[in-house]
Image (cartoon, rainbow, N blue to C red):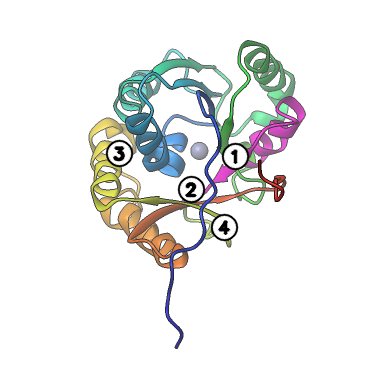
Amino acid sequence: MGAVGIVIGLRPPALDAVVALGAHCDDLAIGAGGTLHTLCAARPGLRVDALVLSGGGTAREEEERAALAAFCPGADLRLTVLTIPDGRLPAHWDEAKDALEDLRARTDPGLVLAPWAGDAHQDHRGLARLVPTAFRDHLALGYEIVKWDGDLGRPSVYQPLTPEAARTKARLLLEHYPSQRHRPWYDAEAFLGLARIRGIECGARYAEGFHTTKLTIDLAGG
Ligand SMILES: [Zn+2]
């Protein structure tokens, strides 16, 4: 067996605004909570425009507001939660598309965090398909959500997490989403287990994995 090294990392030259998209309250935290926390802790004042398509006006929106505030310490966080019914994104396509276009008009992010197009949940998959229609020239990373469907794939991009960041993610998920605790997979073991596996894949202790469909590199540098 060969030696395992650290996988090469790319560092964006500037990152002062991030867009974070979720179909449901808690998607962002499950899929990219460790990345959001790591980003915000390292970049005080980072602008985070978060858009969640469903749960507006319910207890789930309250959970999401408190959770994202904790996941984005020190950030300039702006959260919008829409009222599209869970599982009904295809019938509310225009509303979701308009919300993404409105968001695009308000910010020019260096990074977009969103579901990925291979996700088995139709709301997640639908939102993933909308992303490049509104954010055409942006780096978009598609996060993973562990679920009953067994749709985890092979991510190609990793954000390593320190053990502290991984544990903070699991703790915040358990603290802030009491409405989800009844789900059989909603526990620290699952969150840390997947993060540990993604860590193995990129030469770190823990990580979050992402899918991306397109990016350019500048090999000339300068
Ligand atoms: Zn979801």
Q: Which residue is mark 1?
A: 124
Whether residues under marks 1 and 2 lie with C-beta atoms below 8 angstroms apart, the answer is: yes
First to last magenta residue range: 124-146
Three-letter code for the amino acid on which mark 4 is drawn: Pro
Q: Earlier in the sequence, mark 2 or mark 4?
A: 2
Residue 53: numbered disc: none
Eye-nearest disc, 3 or 4: 4
- Alpha carbon distance from label 1 to label 4: 16 Å
Whether residues under marks 3 and 1 lie with C-beta atoms below 8 angstroms apart, the answer is: no
Q: Residue at x 39, y 18 (%)?
A: 45
Mark 2: C-beta under 8 Å from nearest atom of ligand 1? yes
Q: Which residue is mark 4?
A: 155
Q: Earlier in the sequence, mark 3 or mark 4?
A: 4
Give the answer, above or below, for where 169 lies relative to 8. above
Q: Earlier in the sequence, mark 1 or mark 4?
A: 1
Q: Earlier in the sequence, mark 1 or mark 2?
A: 1
Q: Is residue 128 left or right of residue 85?
A: right
Give the answer, above or below, for where 17 lies relative to 5. above
Q: Residue at x 26, y 53 (%)?
A: 163
Q: Which image quadrant: the N terminus?
A: bottom left
Q: Earlier in the sequence, mark 2 or mark 3?
A: 2
Instruction: Look at the numbered disc 3 and give the secondary structure of its residue.
Output: helix
- Alpha carbon distance from label 1 to label 2: 9 Å
